[in-house]
């Protein structure tokens, strides 16, 4: 009797432990699914997929991406689009929140097979779109599916939140023909289905920036320097030249140029240019044509009224690029300047109002590697400056104010980053 009981217990334990666990069943199903896809036994692959989907809530490992990719291989495009469309709305439509889905993911041979055979390559995208067109999906679904497929191909996207607003950050694929195809598909979908769930975010987020990007890339291929015209940068210039003075001041002061050196710095933002300059090499002295004082008495008192001294000038201006091209740029400007007398302390020159114009000839410009990248160039610059101010002279004119107009003509070389 005891022997029978022991035998029954043994047989029961063997049967109990021989039953496969759920994990083993799910692993077998995933293996069957992979092998069926590899051998193109789509009917059996569909059965394995349905089994895993049915048991997702019971812990069957099947990610949504895996389900989507298997549906593509099985030709179940409408089922695939349900997930594919929702995930794009969740990323790009700030008014839509997708329900949280919890699934078990695993890395195995099936996962590797699906990722390897569905890489984002142009030939795979074209093949998928041909299969979508040949399917029995509704025309709206076909067009949407192809649009989203091309969206993923040409864009690496992410969604972040800043001040409560969703910011979409786009990085573009360099394949311009694919961007053209994507724009054509997207515009057609928006035009034919303007009230669909996807039309608004596609129009708001992608049409304008992609069209702008495409236009910029085409322009860059035609003229790599075209994107640089009327843009910002930084420049350093070295000039020489000559100048003279007119107005009432020329009756009391001598103003000469002795090969002056002018150093300039430019800071550009779009079409505007903030320019700073410092120059030296000016010769100033007294002109006694209209002096109203006793020159001998002033000289005996120690005033160096017969001396000729070196002077220097500084200035700042704001320019506007009126014309810009590969070889020529024209830039009028206005600002303030001042001529500083190093020795004639009795003469005070107040800040001057300055008008002028730069004419730049680019004799060399490095080709930028891509749109938006920095480049450098070398230029010949011709510069004219008109300085209008007033002088109060204490020695020769008894403290009266008189007008002073200086003219400066300069030419030199410059280097720019733009």
Image: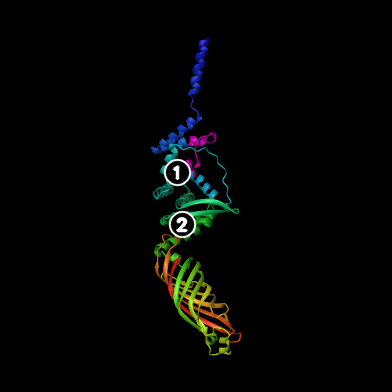
The magenta stretch spans residue 66: yes
Q: Is residue 32 left or right of residue 247?
A: left
Please indicate whether residue 288 sits to the left or right of residue 226 in the image: right
Identify the residue at image location x=43%, y=74%.
412
Name the residue beneath numbered marker 1. Answer: 72
x and y percentages locating residue 59 in the rendered image: 53, 34
Residue visible at 49% across and 54% down?
Answer: 170
Label 2 packing within 10 angstroms: few (<14), some (14-19), many (20+): many
Q: In terms of secondary structure, what is the magenta stretch mainly?
A: helix
> Element type at marker 2?
helix
Q: Is residue 167 above or below residue 115?
A: below
Q: How many numbered discs sit on the rendered protein?
A: 2
Residue 345 visible to an observer of this rendering? yes
Q: Residue at x 50, y 41 (%)?
A: 64
Q: Residue 364 — which label? A: none
Region of the chain picked out in magenta, as a range: 50-79
The answer to whether one can see residue 243 in this image is no
């Amino acid at each position: 009797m005891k022997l029978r009981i022991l035998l029954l217990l043994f047989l029961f334990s063997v049967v109990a432990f021989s039953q496969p666990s759920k994990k083993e069943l799910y692993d077998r199903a995933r293996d069957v699914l992979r092998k069926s896809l590899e051998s193109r036994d789509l009917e059996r692959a569909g059965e394995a997929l349905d089994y895993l989907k049915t048991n997702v809530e019971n812990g069957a490992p099947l990610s949504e991406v895996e389900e989507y990719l298997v549906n593509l291989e099985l030709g179940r495009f409408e089922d695939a689009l349900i997930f594919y469309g929702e995930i794009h709305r969740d990323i790009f439509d700030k008014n839509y929140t997708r329900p949280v889905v919890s699934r078990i993911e695993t890395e195995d041979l099936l996962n590797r097979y699906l990722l390897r055979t569905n890489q984002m390559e142009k030939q795979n995208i074209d093949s998928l779109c041909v299969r979508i067109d040949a399917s029995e999906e509704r025309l709206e679904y076909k067009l949407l599916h192809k649009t989203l497929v091309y969206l993923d191909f040409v864009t690496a996207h992410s969604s972040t939140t800043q001040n409560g607003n969703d910011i979409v950050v786009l990085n573009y694929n360099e394949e311009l023909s694919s961007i053209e195809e994507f724009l054509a598909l997207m515009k057609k979908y928006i035009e034919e289905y303007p009230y669909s769930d996807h039309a608004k975010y596609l129009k708001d987020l992608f049409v304008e920036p992609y069209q702008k990007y495409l236009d910029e890339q085409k322009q860059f291929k035609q003229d790599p320097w075209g994107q640089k015209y009327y843009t910002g940068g930084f420049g350093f210039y070295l000039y020489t030249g000559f100048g003279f003075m007119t107005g009432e001041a020329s009756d009391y002061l001598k103003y000469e140029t002795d090969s002056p050196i002018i150093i300039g710095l430019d800071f550009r933002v779009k079409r505007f240019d903030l320019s700073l300059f410092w120059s030296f090499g000016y010769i100033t002295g007294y002109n006694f044509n209209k002096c109203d004082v006793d020159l001998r008495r002033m000289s005996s008192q120690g005033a160096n009224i017969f001396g000729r001294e070196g002077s220097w000038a500084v200035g700042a201006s704001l320019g506007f690029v009126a014309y810009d091209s590969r070889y020529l740029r024209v830039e009028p400007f206005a600002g303030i300047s001042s001529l500083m007398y190093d020795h004639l302390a009795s003469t005070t020159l107040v800040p001057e109002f300055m008008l002028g114009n730069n004419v730049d000839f680019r004799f060399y410009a490095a080709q930028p590697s891509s749109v938006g990248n920095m480049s450098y160039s070398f230029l010949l610059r011709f510069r004219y400056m008109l300085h209008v101010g007033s002088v109060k002279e204490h020695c020769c004119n008894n403290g009266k104010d008189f007008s002073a107009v200086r003219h400066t003509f300069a030419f030199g070389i410059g280097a720019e980053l733009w």
